[in-house]
Image (cartoon, rainbow, N blue to C red):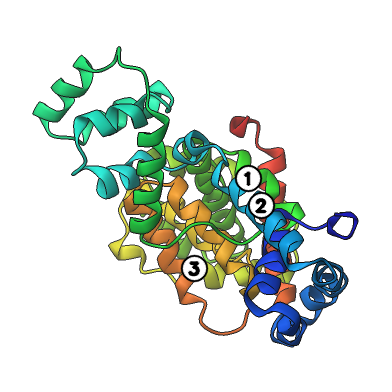
């Protein structure tokens, strides 16, 4: 449809569902959306409602089918294997073998490691079987129904879309980079005693890296330095393992780059991490119960995305 041009797939689906469920009364629901979203959807919805009921139903079915066929294997490749094991470990080896054959070998190894020995043995004997599309679809539906935080998610803003391309391992390096950068900001102009105390809370490798960065120095506004210090103070450093401190600081800062209305889209990154770290990121996302200050979100997002673009280790 001409009027659908410029809309995302989710926005097109919303127009279709509204018209299908509410018919001619669908437009009366627009005021319940944000002003910007309602304004963008008004014309496409009006155009869609001008079609006959049969034409609307046909377009709806086409969209539904296309969404169903969004590569099952792509979803499974993006999610950390730990979530899949938790949700699907009770399934039969015959069904699981179909899942494994649609995944990268690196993830299959991790999945196998978390399954009972007898299941692993049976699965290895099934490696020559052809994958069953029906089984993959069945597993996808099972996971969607059992996923702790729900799927699919909201649309990412354009500037955050590069984050989707990062693998799980790249995300871990990314969060560590964010953490080290944030700690170095927080320690700027801080008393030497306080600096030593923080350095002692880091593992040796991170402490050495941090000292190097602090020697290089850099310029930041008083506001940004203060925010970095408050981020560090908000954490219970005594309870965080040395080897995870920079990583957890990074997770905390990353959770602050989303505006309130963007939070649903942030949960896709929870699934890119292991369940242990994923639940940690979710906790930081959930802590933001009061409306976020757009200016602060913008400042945090700018320095996080600068790290993404400048870090050669992220590929």
* Earlier residue among tags 2 and 3: 2
Q: Nearer the viewer, mark 3 or mark 1?
A: 1
Residue shown at the point (44%, 44%) measured from the top left: 207
Query: Looking at the rendered structure, which numbered label has been put on residue 63?
Result: 2
Question: Do the residues bearing badges 1 and 2 touch, measured as CB atoms within 8 Å?
Answer: yes
Image location (x, y in percent) of residue 69: 56, 41
Q: Secondary structure at mark 3?
A: helix
Q: CA distance from mark 2 to mark 3?
A: 32 Å
Q: Is residue 238 above or below residue 143?
A: below
Residue shown at the point (14%, 29%) measured from the top left: 119
The answer to whether residue 10 shows anywhere in this view is no
**Total marks in image:** 3
Residue shown at the point (43%, 64%) measured from the top left: 282
Q: Secondary structure at mark 2?
A: helix
To which residue does mark 1 refer? 66
Considering every residue shown, the one lying at the far top of the view is: 128
Q: Secondary structure at mark 1?
A: helix
To which residue does mark 3 refer? 285
How busy is the neighbourhood of tag 2: few (under 14 within 10 Å), some, or many (20 plus)?
A: some
Q: CA distance from mark 1 to mark 2?
A: 5 Å
Image location (x, y in percent) of residue 258: 63, 66
Judge by depth and name the residue closer to the eye, 249 or 144. Answer: 144
Q: Nearer the viewer, mark 2 or mark 3?
A: 2
Q: CA distance from mark 3 to mark 1?
A: 31 Å
Q: Is residue 111 above or below residue 181?
A: above
């Amino acid at each position: 449809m001409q009027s659908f041009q410029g809309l995302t797939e989710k926005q097109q689906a919303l127009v279709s569902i509204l018209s299908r469920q509410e018919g001619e009364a669908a437009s009366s629901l627009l005021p319940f959306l944000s002003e910007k979203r309602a304004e963008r959807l008004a014309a496409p919805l009006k155009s869609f409602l001008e079609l006959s009921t049969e034409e609307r139903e046909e377009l709806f079915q086409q969209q539904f089918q296309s969404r169903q066929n969004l590569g099952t294997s792509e979803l499974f490749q993006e999610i950390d294997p730990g979530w899949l094991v938790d949700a699907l470990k009770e399934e039969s080896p015959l069904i699981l073998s179909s899942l494994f054959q649609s995944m990268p070998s690196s993830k299959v190894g991790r999945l196998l490691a978390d399954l009972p020995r007898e299941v692993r043995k049976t699965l290895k004997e099934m490696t020559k079987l052809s994958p069953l599309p029906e089984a993959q679809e069945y597993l996808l539906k099972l996971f969607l129904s059992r996923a702790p935080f729900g799927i699919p998610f909201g649309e990412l803003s354009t500037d955050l879309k590069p984050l989707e391309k990062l693998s799980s391992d790249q995300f871990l390096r990314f969060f560590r980079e964010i953490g080290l950068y944030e700690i170095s900001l927080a320690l700027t102009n801080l008393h030497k005693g306080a600096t030593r105390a923080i350095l002692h809370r880091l593992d040796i490798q991170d402490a050495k890296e941090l000292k190097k960065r602090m020697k290089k120095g850099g310029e930041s506004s008083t506001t940004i330095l203060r925010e970095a210090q408050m981020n560090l103070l908000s954490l219970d450093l005594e309870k965080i393992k040395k080897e995870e401190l920079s990583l957890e600081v990074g997770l905390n800062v990353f959770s602050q780059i989303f505006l309130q209305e963007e939070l649903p889209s942030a949960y896709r990154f929870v699934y890119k991490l292991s369940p242990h770290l994923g639940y940690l990121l979710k906790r930081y996302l959930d802590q933001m119960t009061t409306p976020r200050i757009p200016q602060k979100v913008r400042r945090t997002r700018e320095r996080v995305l600068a790290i993404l673009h400048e870090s050669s280790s992220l590929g």
